[in-house]
Image (spheres, grey):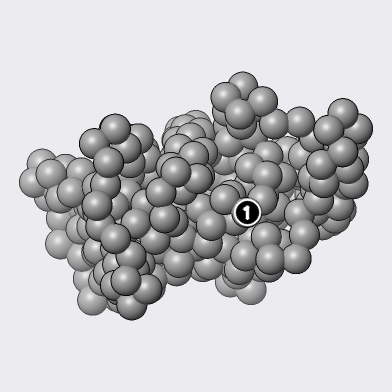
Amino acid sequence: MPFFVALMASILYGSADFLGGIASRRDPVLRVTTVTQACGMAALLVGSMFVHGVPSHADIAWAALAGITGGLGVLLLYHAMTIGQVSTVAPLISMIAIAVPVGVGLLLGERPGVLPLAGVALGAIAIVAISGGGEHHETGASTRVEGRALAVAIASGVFIGGFLVSMGRVGTGGGLWPLVIARAGGTLVVGTVALVRRTSWRVERSAWPLLICCGVLDSTANLLYLWAVQRAPLSLTATLVSLAPASTVVLAQIVLRERLVTAQKAGIALALVAIVLLSRG
């Protein structure tokens, strides 16, 4: 059951990432991230009224850390999607995010086996292929994840990996409150950055459905991930959740009609194979 729940979380994460990336191309990234974080928190607050539980002090601390790392990770993810190609940025961030919980899991004594370790190596190769590439044969436009976009993607992956680890340390019995605390922390961090940058808070009426949907999908994915990681190893669950780029890339191909060079297509395929191998732990 945790396997299926983690896969469902990955689909919702990927869909939310795509919607957030689309919204960030129309409105300032800081405003989009803050509003989606707040929408997700509102949904969790409503849900907490029906799910009983009291988090421990340790759970509160880990949830707060998850909120900070997750908020910054999503903010950088959306920013990376505005300056880079969605189909290449999303898998790159995911593969970097995988390394963090897998590494922590190994340090905590998890022994995933030969196939997952082979997946780690294959993932490193996939990152090189995805961030490489060249010019699009039809348009001549570069599809390489370069400079600024690459740096933002790497930072986003590290922060998202930190979120996965932090939520994985939250115990059972806290109900939805750890998720509420995490989302509140993320909203506070991103909102503070938006205030410092003097970001306008005016949201177009037509943008609200997209932002609300993004926030609710992301919060639901958080809920499913928390449930799964409390019942299965961190390295396994976090890796399955990192299948998220699959749905992001599919949506980008269908909606945005993004095209990739051959090397990058191979890189994405290798990334997905790597995730499958990692799940064999």
Q: Quadrant of the N terminus?
A: top left
Lateral position of residue 174 relative to residue 150, left or right = left
Badge 1: few (under 14), some or many (20 or more) residues near its Cα, within 10 Å?
A: some
Q: What residue appears at the point 13 percent right and 44 percent down from the top-left corner?
A: 46
Q: Nearer the viewer, residue 269 or 16?
A: 16
Q: What residue appears at the point 41 percent right and 49 percent down from the top-left corner?
A: 27
Residue 268 location (% of width, % of height): 77, 39
What residue would you read off at disc 1?
A: 83
Q: Can residue 221 be seen by looking at this rendering?
A: no
Residue positioned most to the left? 49
Q: What residue appears at the point 37 percent right and 73 percent down from the top-left corner?
A: 197
Residue type, label 1: Ile
- State whether residue 38 is above or below residue 135: below
Q: Can residue 79 be seen by looking at this rendering?
A: yes
Q: Nearer the viewer, residue 212 or 234?
A: 212
Q: Nearer the viewer, residue 280 or 18?
A: 18
| The image quarter in which residue 186 lies | bottom left
Lateral position of residue 4 relative to residue 264, left or right = left
- How many numbered dots are placed on residues in this image? 1
Q: Nearer the viewer, residue 95 or 228?
A: 95
Residue 37 location (% of width, % of height): 31, 54
Residue 89 location (% of width, % of height): 67, 49
| The image quarter in which residue 135 lies | top right
Q: Circle 1 — which element?
A: helix
Q: What residue appears at the point 80 percent right and 35 percent down from the top-left corner?
A: 260
- State whether residue 232 is above or below residue 147: above
Lateral position of residue 228 relative to residue 88, left or right = left
Residue 232 location (% of width, % of height): 49, 49
Residue positioned most to the top? 254
